[in-house]
Image (spheres, helix red, strand yellow):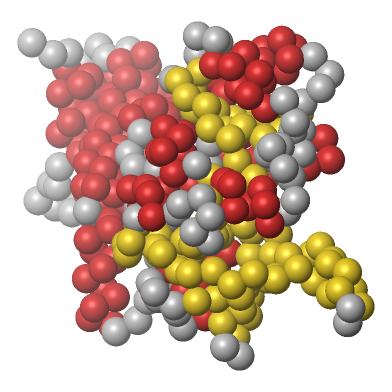
Amino acid sequence: MISYELFIGGRYLRAARGNRFVSFISMISMAGIAIGVTVLIVVLSVMNGFEVELRERILSMTSHATISGFGGAMRNWESVAEQAKTHPEVAAVAPYVEGQALLAARELSSGIQLYGVNPLQERQVSKIPDLMTAGALSDLRAGGFGIVLGSELAKHLRVGVGDRVTLVIPQASVTVAGVVPRTRRFLVVGIFAAGMYEYDRNFAYLHLDDAARLYRLGDAVSGVRLRLHDLFEAPRIAHTIAVELGTGPYVNDWTRSHENFFRSIALTKRVLFFILLLVVVVAAFNIISTLVMVVKDKQSDIAILRTLGATPRSILKIFIAQGTGIGVIGTVLGVLLGVLLSVNLESLVHLLERVLSTQFLDAQVYFMSDLPAVVQWPDALQIAATAFGLCCLSTLYPAWRAARTQPAQALRHE
């Protein structure tokens, strides 16, 4: 059992024999709402997917938090690591040496970010061992002077596993020939691919002891990496550890190291939401024009209902029901289509790339070559609620005009 207001409002959504134009306009309004909701869900899903993928790839190469010494060296790193390990939120700790260098092979060269790691301990704090495409991180041995390169860096230098490269660091050695940069020949023992151009093009790894010897750190290291049980608690845990350690070392976490990336994504997501919401607003204006035309077309029907005893409140409900029906159908169709496109977006993009023989995303510009999409239901519900709210608001003025219709004036020329 439904009220007669809902029944009549539903009837007005369907085409009548004499006038199908109004129903056609109603379908256009539904399509506008559906397209607006679909575009919003797809775009925000792409932004969500980009954020998730970027976070995963960054954290596959870096740690959740780091403790480093001022001046680039930490002498008492063992005691710092032991103290950090006692924290209940810390899952693993590993030392590292960090520095910049120039890598050369034949006539080619490239500036790099160099890291010295202990292969066994590094497996506990990052996913670098799982990203190896040739060789293994465990092939780095103390005194072996082996090096692991990113895939894009190896491609640039045209080297592979078994080739030798020359490493030049910005520290001088005094020889009989004068002051010259320190250089050392290394054997390429592995290649990794993180799937993020910035890392694959600029990162290289040595054994911790070789890196410490190269930078003349002795028993010191640059700092220690931390892996946490909950990466989203990294800011709070880093602050707690910093307070416990006092004023000596410097504690940092991944949200601060890559703050610009995630802030830009969040800002872009908010801006795109409000810009694309204008599509839904335009569709809501179509509902206003549709209902105004329906009210004009149904003047005699309204007058007859009023003479049969219908109150202005009932007339108001009829046209609110019609506009709400347009909004509900358009919003539901938009959510279903948006979720369907988002779930299959990556496959569709790859299909278009094969058909058009092109690449939409250049890894050198966008950091990755895929277009991931992750549907987050809070975003979908927010979009659906906003679209439905705009549709409901757009029904008020036409319904108010219909409720003010005077039966005598409407039937004067009938």
Decide if residue 210 is in sight here. Answer: yes
In the image, taking residue 336 as reference, residue 315 lies left or right, namely: right
Q: Residue furthest front?
A: 176
Decide if residue 258 is in sight here. Answer: no
285 w.r.t. 224: above or below: below
As rendered, which of 40 and 136 lies closer to the eye? Answer: 136
At x 39%, y 63%, the residue is 190
As rendered, which of 172 and 341 lies closer to the eye? Answer: 172
As rendered, which of 73 and 290 lies closer to the eye? Answer: 73
Picture coordinates of residue 382, whole percent (x, y): 42, 29
The quadrant where residue 402 appears: top left
As rendered, which of 183 and 327 lies closer to the eye? Answer: 183
116 w.r.t. 397: above or below: below
Picture coordinates of residue 188, whole percent (x, y): 45, 69
At x 15%, y 34%, the residue is 11
Quadrant of the drawing holding the N terminus = top left
In the image, taking residue 63 as reference, residue 18 lies left or right, namely: left
The quadrant where residue 354 appears: bottom left
112 w.r.t. 281: above or below: below
Quadrant of the drawing holding the C terminus = top left
Picture coordinates of residue 32, whole percent (x, y): 35, 51
At x 40%, y 43%, the residue is 127
Q: How many marks?
A: 0
Picture coordinates of residue 389, whole percent (x, y): 43, 28
At x 58%, y 35%, the residue is 95
23 w.r.t. 327: above or below: below
